Amino acid sequence: MKYAIVGTGAIGGFYGGELARIGKDVHFLLRSDYEFVKQNGLKVHSVNGDFCINPINAYNDAKQMPQCDIILVCMKTTQNHLLPELLYPLVKPSTCIVLVQNGLNIEKKLASSYPDIDIAAGMAFVCCNKIKIGEIMHLDYGKLTVSPYQGKCSYLKTLCNDLTEAGIDNYLWEEYVTARWRKLVWNIPYNGLTVVLNTTTELLMKNEASRQLVKELMEEVRAGGLACGADIPDNFIDEMLKSTDQMRPYDPSMRLDFLRHHQMEIEAIYSNPIAAAHNAGVEMPKIAMLEKQLKFIQAGYLQKV
């Protein structure tokens, strides 16, 4: 079983690194880190134990990579327009492409380019960051939930078995809509509010006013998800709040993009869910306001680049 990691940042480096650590055949596609990682390996500092993958199957050109059975796409959704051409050398008829990315309806465009290929969603519940060239810091959690989007996706069982062997919590969820919307219950409030309020998840939870706002945003997400057919139980919001209380201080990916003046994943995490809920007859006014604030903030620094 050959794995490809497309986007060897924090998420790709962590999951790909863990699979390679236990001897799986993993091939990593890198950009700016390629020369360093090729020479020095990929280092992962983890709460579960540090390790380094060296030697490593590292590439800076997808055309040089082998065709793979499972492709984990771990790049930001803002780069998804590159995927049809980028993945072409890696795909064979039996390949399963797993989009380990945030947001909703992000598989649709890829499915139109690869209508006969298995495509799945991947929801990472993990706190990890890239701390410098070729080095990943894993702070907390690690669960990867996968869900079929197109095709039988039979290789997902193999992926889950390999993750279990690596000590990574995982879950194969047959209900795509539920899996994506449940992740949004966390992503929508914390990603956006840490940017707009220029703070961390820890401080959001410690302040009574911001904690209440987080909960209200979660309730809007749940209402939108239920309208779209997702199964989100009554106690799910309290579970999310509790797990975040227990989380180590953490900057979500959108806040890191904001601090680095990178394009944020506004369309995938906000615009798409807002549109889906609207089409199902539910409005999410607080989330819509947060979306507009994020667009304003992003326009301010992207125009200066």
Image: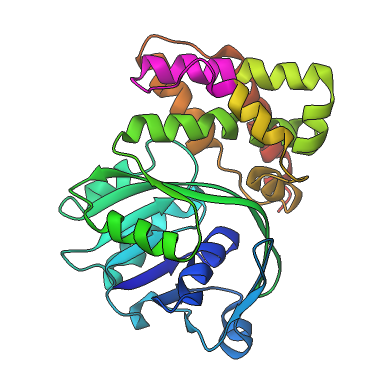
Residue under the image location 74 percent in, 49 percent down: 304
Q: Examine the rendered structure and indicate whether residue 48 appears above or below residue 152.
A: below
Q: Residue at x 67, y 49 (%)?
A: 257
Residue 4: x and y in percent read 38, 70
Query: Which residue corresponds to the image point at 41% horizontal and 76% vertical from the top-left?
Result: 27
Side (left or right) of 134 relative to 68: right
Q: Between residues 277 and 44, which one lies in front from this camera angle?
A: 44
Q: Position of residue 294 (x, y in %)?
A: 66, 32
Residue 303 visible in the snapshot = no
Side of 302 relative to 144 (left or right)? right
Please tell me how many numbered marks the rendered image carries. Answer: 0
Check residue 219 for magenta coloring: yes
| Quadrant of the rendered image containing residue 179 | top left
Q: Quadrant of the N terminus?
A: bottom left
Quarter occupied by the C terminus:
bottom right
Question: What colour scheme was applied to this rendering of the protein?
Answer: rainbow
Judged left or right of residue 279, residue 58 is right
Q: Quadrant of residue 139?
A: bottom right
Q: Say above or below: 43 vs 142.
A: below
Residue shown at 18% from the left, 48% from the top: 151
Image vertical order of residue 139 relative to residue 104, above or below? below
x then y, percent, for residue 108? 30, 41
Residue 268 falls inside the magenta stretch? no
Q: What main secondary structure does the magenta stretch of the protein show?
A: helix
Q: Quadrant of residue 228?
A: top left
Q: Which residues are magenta?
A: 218-237
Q: Position of residue 201 (x, y in %)?
A: 75, 36
